[in-house]
Amino acid sequence: MTVADRLGPTIFERSRPGRGGGKVPHPPKDALSRIPAGNLREAAPRLPEVSEPELTRHYVNLSQLNYSVDTGFYPLGSCTMKYNPKINEWAARLNGFAALHPLAPDEASQGTLQLLWELEEALAEIGGMKAVTLQPAAGAQGELTGILMIRAYHRSRGETDRTEVLVPDSAHGTNPATASMAGFKTITIPSAPDGGVDVDAFRAALGPRTAAIMITNPSTLGLFEARLCELLDAVHEVGALAYMDGANLNAIMGRFKPGEAGFDVMHINVHKTFSTPHGGGGPGAGPVGVGEKLLPFLPSPRVLRASDGSFRLEGAAERPTSIGRVRAFVGNTGVLVRAYAYIRAHGGTGLCEVSDDAVLAANYLKVRVAEVLDVPFTRPCMHEFVASSATLKAETGIRTLDVAKRLIDYGFHPPTIYFPLTVDEALLIEPTETESLETLDAFVEALRRIVVEAHSDPELLHSAPHSSPVRRLDETMAARQPNLRWRAMTGVQMPCPD
Ligand SMILES: *Cc1c(COP(=O)(O)O)cnc(C)c1O
């Protein structure tokens, strides 16, 4: 079957004039004349005309071309395709939350405000922080919010010479991007040979110009920073602040509180740690927790609880030290409802178990993968670990990209590849804590067979995947000249709107 066959005709190509879809039950006779003339269309919209079953089949069939957490194992490191309990979808769709108008007055929004307030409390407890803002719409925006608060803090003390942010070379790309967006100069610090941050290199770069350091802990190599206390002490000695990228929180919940360890600010990717499906780049949330020093600068409006137990949003001019709003309204509420439901369902002990199981699954898989590929860092990992096909490449010419593409033929989503950048031919593998032993073993078995194939039939791997609707793409062309626009493949019935 060709790609065109698998993808089928588009919904516009299926359209036939007059072939209707759903029916509106008993519309009033004067329905159209009730709409003001100025709001009526001059021409009918160019919508495809198909029957309801055709429409349903079209989109259900398209959805079957996707790989998803509902169809198989998704060991994507760094981006953490977590367990997303289906019941949280129900909770997020409850009318009281989903249908609440964002401009509804506080009196009519008590339930949502209470949920937000309680979620802030729970996240502050988990992070060991004084307070939390739920506004940022993603981790990257949480970082920006945190760094803007750090900037406001230094300015409030008249320390405008603090223009530098130190970031280790293993950091997620959003860290240096954030520092630059906030007007800081990023100083990249090389990692130590054991994969951890190089505390001595950090110490040497710290000084009166340092505004902050940004550390991901556990790191993007899946390692917990061994010399954290030493590093944080050194940062505070020079009057700088410490930012923790908390995207990997799912490995340490209940076991380590960044605020208590001395971090001044952190973000949490609730769509990674607390159950929002985010594979399609859908909405997220990046709440930010702060310690005492940054409390005055939190974005406004905050959710406040009055002494009578009622809730309200802070007024616009109530806290002049605030950095202001970072997002419309109160944040991505649907994502926050899911996070609340996840946290309440697990409770404190349950969240500790989630972390323990994530660490156990990752360490098990790491030991098993070491049977077939290189595993450069031998000390125990947290929720993810780095493997490498550098040896396989030297022996057979097969690269990590080929291994990843061939995994698709074995029914697995590939792990993250070529990240972190500091490891040659890297694969960043993260099993979630809910995967069974059988699934983890089957994944290792697929890798084992691929390594055998690399020696016996390398061409099979170079041209993989063989079973997917879209075969091997030209990676460079796909990035540089993405062709995302629909073009007729089987004859046009109707022009597609641009
Ligand atoms: C995912 C991730 C981010 C960015 O978060 P988004 O929600 O995707 O914006 C930042 N740092 C790390 C370590 C991450 O894994």
Image (spheres, rainbow, N blue to C red):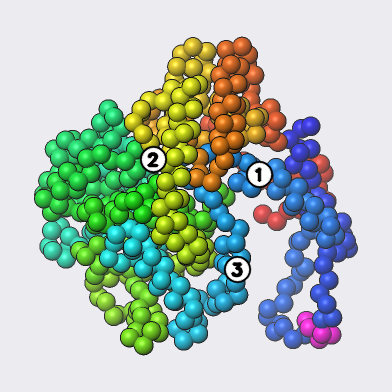
Q: Residue at x 27, y 77 (%)?
A: 319
Residue 26 point in image, percent of width and height? 84, 81
The image shows residue 171 at horizontal and vertical percentages of 34, 41
- The residue mark sitting in front, 2 or 1, is 2
The image shows residue 388 at horizontal and vertical percentages of: 44, 25
Can residue 220 be seen by looking at this rendering? no
Mark 2 vs mark 3, foreground winner is 2
Disc 1 and disc 3: Cα gap in Å?
A: 23 Å
Give coordinates of residue 470: x percent, y percent.
67, 35
Magenta range: 28-32
- Relative horizontal placement of residue 397, taking residue 128 as reference (left or right): right
Q: Main secondary structure of the magenta part?
A: loop
In what quadrant of the picture does the N terminus appear? top right
Residue at the spot of label 3:
93
Q: How much space separates mark 2 and mark 1, taking CA atoms?
A: 26 Å
What is the tally of numbered marks visible in this picture?
A: 3
Q: Earlier in the sequence, mark 2 or mark 3?
A: 3
Q: Residue at x 61, y 17 (%)?
A: 453
**Residue at the image point whose x is 83% and y is 64% from the top:** 21
Eyeballing the image, is 478 above or below 424?
A: below
Which of marks 1 and 2 precedes in the sequence? 1
Q: Which mark is on residue 71?
A: 1
**Secondary-structure class at tag 1:** loop
Residue 424 in sight in this render:
yes
Image quadrant assignment for residue 483: top right
Tell me the residue that label 2 is attached to: 382
Q: Amino acid at mark 1?
A: Thr
Report helix, strand or loop for mark 2: loop
